Image (cartoon, rainbow, N blue to C red):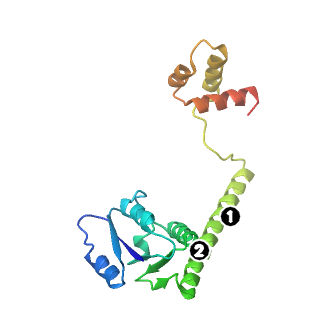
Amino acid sequence: MKIGYARVSTLEQNLDLQRDALQKAGCDKVIVDQISGTTSNRPGLEKVRELLRSGDTLVVWRLDRLGRSLRDLIDWMQYLGEQGIGLQSLQEAIDTTTPAGRLTFHLFGALAEFERNLIRERTLAGLAAARARGRKGGRRKALDADKRKLAVDLYLEKKMPVSQICELMGISKPTLYSYVREIQGTG
């Protein structure tokens, strides 16, 4: 069975072009979303996921209708592959039910992995360069050293509930506990 998925970002946009193309491609059902692609909660796309079965093909007008990013598309492709479901994109002429279509999509996946590795390498190199200059990475402490010591002293004296200490100091419980571990030398 071919199931089509169409999406427009705003209510002013028209779905007719996508719907017509999907029906012409032989889709038995066409599910639509009128929501931004940057929104992760897309009810139509969830409905598509529920409907698809092994041997089916998901058909989209263009790949950008399906995924918000290349990573998103790769995740979808992996999911579809694991479920034995094909993917067909009409505008890009990709059909993963054919060997050439699978190759094209795997090339996309390889490029995405290459990009992730480059980003990781640049990040690690930047952190190493900063450490060489004496800069420490990580988040700044919410409280200065004196206030951290005061918060820990209040905690250790047990004269005030933890929630009250946190409210007074403007910090969360996990932050207070990390300060306690830091001062006690156990963290």
User: Which residue position is annotated with label 1?
Assistant: 121
Q: How many marks?
A: 2
In the image, is residue 167 above or below residue 140? Answer: above
Q: Position of residue 118 (x, y in %)?
A: 65, 68
Residue 93 showing in the rendered view? yes
Q: Position of residue 28 (x, y in %)?
A: 35, 77
Q: In the rendering, at what x and y percent does residue 146 appear?
A: 63, 24
Residue position marked by numbered label 2 in the rendering? 109
Q: In this view, which residue lies farthest toward the right?
A: 185
Mark 1, secondary structure of its residue: helix
The amino acid at mark 1 is: Glu
Hey, which quadrant is residue 98 in on the image? bottom right
Foreground residue among 162 and 100? 100
Amino acid type indicated by mark 2: Gly
At x 53% / y 22%, what residue is drawn? Answer: 163
Q: In the picture, residue 140 is in which quadrant?
A: top right
Q: Residue at x 64, y 45 (%)?
A: 138
Instruction: Give the crowd class for mark 1: few <14, some 14-19, many >=20 residues within 10 Å.
Output: few
Front in this rendered view, residue 139 or 106: 106
Is 63 positioned to the left or the right of 35 in the image?
right
Gap in Å between the C-alphas at discs 1 and 2? 18 Å
Where the N terminus falls, by quadrant?
bottom left
Residue 68 vertical position relative to residue 158 in the rendered view, above or below: below
Mark 2 residue crowding within 10 angstroms, few (<14) / some (14–19) / many (20+): some
Q: Nearer the viewer, mark 1 or mark 2?
A: 2
